[in-house]
Amino acid sequence: MNPPKHLYIGGKWYSGEGSERQMINPTNGCVFTEVREASKNQTGDAVRAARYAYNETTWRTDIKKRVNSLNKLADLLEEQTEQFAIAETTNTGKPIRESRLDISDSVSCLRYYANLVSNRKAWIKKMPDGTKSRVIEEPIGVCALIVPWNFPLLLGMWKIAPALAAGNTVVFKPSELTAITAIKFAELVDQCDIPPGVFNLVLGGGTPVGQALVKHPDVDKVSFTGGSDTGRKINEQCASSFKRVSLELGGKSPIIVLEDADIKAAVEWGIFGSFFNQGEVCVASSRLLIHKSIYQSFVEYFLEKLQRINVGNPLDEGTEIGPVISAGHREKIENYIEIGKSEGARLLYGGQRVGEKGYFLSPAVFTEVKQSMRIVQEEIFGPVVTIQTFRDDNEAIELANGTLYGLAAGVLSNDFERAERLASCLKAGTIWINSYHTPYVEAPWGGFKQSGIGRELGPQGLSGYTEVKHINLNNELKPVGWYK
Ligand code: NDP
């Protein structure tokens, strides 16, 4: 039997010449399929194919073609929402209703960038000396797009859609744990009459495949989403050649609950913020900061609600929390729970394995925590939340800003002026007031401090894939008049 072909390079399918990788369903710990990953040479082939398509096809100049292709991709993906959602849930363990959201958000992202580039106007102005200046945005060239396993297709689309819309060509590398929807997406690209080499898919680990992409001299831009340690390494590697780079990294985001907030609503947002996608979300509200006067009633209701949460098979419609991604990741989370206990925090609830099979954990809550504790400072990336109190707004701000991260934050209150004042003092890229989690394709997303460099989504997300060029035009060629 011929080995399956899972790499999409230069418009053709290839069998990987790298390692064989088993795809594990985290719900039962069983292998559901296998893929063959790319070798270093094949990764280089993908970059060469992208370079050829960038230089030799009309992709970078033909906006109409790009808009049609992105819209066609959106239509095809929308038609297959359910198949993609089931594949995503099987591969990641996320509840099926959340996978459906991922796919519909991916469709919206493709349409948004198709629409944005089709309406983009060049900036033209008359200058004080009578010349005319035009500022245009051009594609950067070949972009390497590297994403993690928590939202495999959606985080990919936040890069693929703007990069392609802007006229770049791309090499996409999903996490080694979650290759399935990336392969399915490449199958859609194959049906769209997109020039060969514009979109390339390579599968494989951070080493050798991710690293080979980052170091490749023909890659003009690296767009990376993942952990801060990996991001730091990539940033250093890109610095030596001034390769363009954008980084969407980790977080330790707080929700601040003011004393006037409705307790029931605040608890629901706290649970949603902390445990959506098993807490495996860069913006998870893993720190809840509650005004001292409502702390007792908040915690009581939080506990009551949490005990009713449905942890189970993510393909069941009623499931609210699925398994975490892998056995290794569950151990990492459990290790943090032990660290929390040994630091003197009180594990109020959860953190237990659930069921015999798969990688389930009950959602965990720590109280009696100190700001200096590792469970407050470090990203756990799982269903673990800490609850702290504050006395006044200054203390809330100090606690909220008191980590190395700055990705997101929430404020819950009916006092909008006070909430806005707090928002202006928070060092984070996204602040939700009386809501949490929703990314809007129209608005930028990214981090302050060690949560990243650059922004995705919105017009800023498109700018991340363009170089800005200023053309100054003098209508008549006359002597400079500067020399005698
Ligand atoms: P990693 O940083 O381990 O990996 C992310 C991606 O980078 C994977 O595809 C990985 O490959 C690849 N990679 C690893 N090492 C290298 C390298 N040296 N060179 C190039 N590529 C490399 O993160 P996780 O997959 O563990 O994802 C979790 C992290 O992602 C969390 O910290 C989370 O906060 C962050 N994240 C940030 C988001 C944001 O928008 N800011 C959104 C979602 C997640 P492989 O895994 O195949 O080895």
Image (cartoon, rainbow, N blue to C red):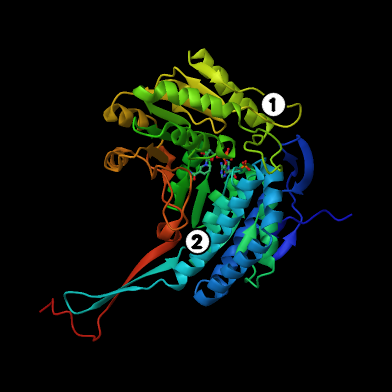
Give the class, few, some or many, for how many residues have Cα within 10 Å of label 1's Cα (few <14, many ≥20).
some
Which residue is situated farthest in the left direction here?
484
Q: Is residue 86 above or below residue 28?
A: below
Residue 98 shown left or right of residue 250 in the figure: right
Of residue 484 and residue 429, the one placed in the foreground of this image is 429
Q: Quadrant of residue 313?
A: top right
What amino acid type should be assigned to the residue bearing mark 1?
A: Val
Residue 350 location in percent, x, y? 59, 23
The image position of residue 28, as x and y in percent, is 76, 35
Q: Position of residue 25 (x, y in %)?
A: 73, 40
Query: Where does label 2 land, which residue?
Result: 162
Tag on residue 354? 1
Which of the two residues, 87 or 314, is positioned nearer the viewer here?
314
Q: Residues within 10 Å of mark 2 (few under 14, many from 20)?
A: many
The C terminus lies in quadrant: bottom left
Q: Which amino acid lies under the numbered mark 2 shown in the image of this protein? A: Pro
Image quadrant in which the N terminus is located: bottom right
Residue at x 64%, y 25% (from the top left corner): 331
Q: Residue at x 55, y 25 (%)?
A: 304
On screen, residue 413 versus residue 245, left or right, reads: left
Relative to 124, say whether 396 is above or below: above
The answer to which of 18 and 74 lies nearer the viewer is 74
**Foreground mark, 2 or 1?**
1
Residue at image position (69%, 26%) is: 354
In the structure shown, which secondary structural element does the residue marked by tag 1 occupy? Answer: loop
Q: Kindly report the distance in space between the C-alpha atoms of the residues bearing marks 2 and 1.
A: 40 Å
Secondary structure found at label 2: helix
